[in-house]
Amino acid sequence: MDKMVISNDEFFAEVKRLLASERKVTIPVKGYSMLPFIRGGKDLVVLEPENDYRPGDIVLFYVGREGEGRYVMHRIIRLEERKGTMWAVIRGDGVLENTEQVPLSSVIARAVTVLRDGKRPVDPRSPGHLRKVRFWDALRPFRRYILFVYKHLPWNIGWVRQNY
């Protein structure tokens, strides 16, 4: 299969254009930061423009100064109002401690569906999924070890080497 490689800036400019026209956009995901709920190189995420963000939502946002930052997809931990501006405290499911704090104006879209292996749809706002997220969050002291084992399971080893 032929691949076309474009820069992240070009890719996300087109994603933002499509979202601005009220369309859903499906994108591939890279990285470990949303393990175990989103697997880079395996899963796809369907994004939708949104204005009503809640804790637990998986969001695409821009972090850093314009032209010097990067696009990241993580989960909102909580929302805070600071001097009349709403901010989101955000952390990846596979991230052990660090959080990002971004104004809601930096959030581009919300994930409405995760396509496991690019096929099986998962609703990230469903009560069952959010129960799993809360359970995973309760395991935070042990997540380093759980993720190490997860990445080294026989069926993941090839995926880890191929994608990272």
Image (cartoon, rainbow, N blue to C red):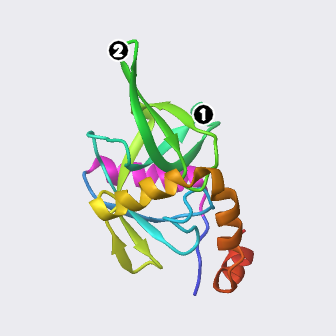
Whole-percent x and y of residue 28? 50, 67
Label 1: state its secondary structure.
Answer: loop
Looking at the figure, which quarter contains the C terminus? Answer: bottom right
Q: Residues within 10 Å of mark 2 (few under 14, many from 20)?
A: few
* Mark 1 residue type: Gly
Whole-percent x and y of residue 112? 32, 59
| Dot label at residue 84 | 2
Label 2: state its secondary structure.
Answer: loop
Task: Compare residues 152 and 146 and report the one nearer the observer.
Answer: 146
The correct choice, above or below, for 98 with respect to 157 in the image is above
Q: Disc 2 versus disc 1: distance between alpha carbons? A: 21 Å
Whole-percent x and y of residue 63? 56, 37
Disc with the residue nearer the chain's start (2 vs 1): 1
| Dot label at residue 64 | 1
* Mark 2 residue type: Gly
**Residue at the spot 39% in from the left edge and 81% down from the top edge:** 119
Whole-percent x and y of residue 50? 28, 45
Q: Which residues are magenta?
A: 6-21
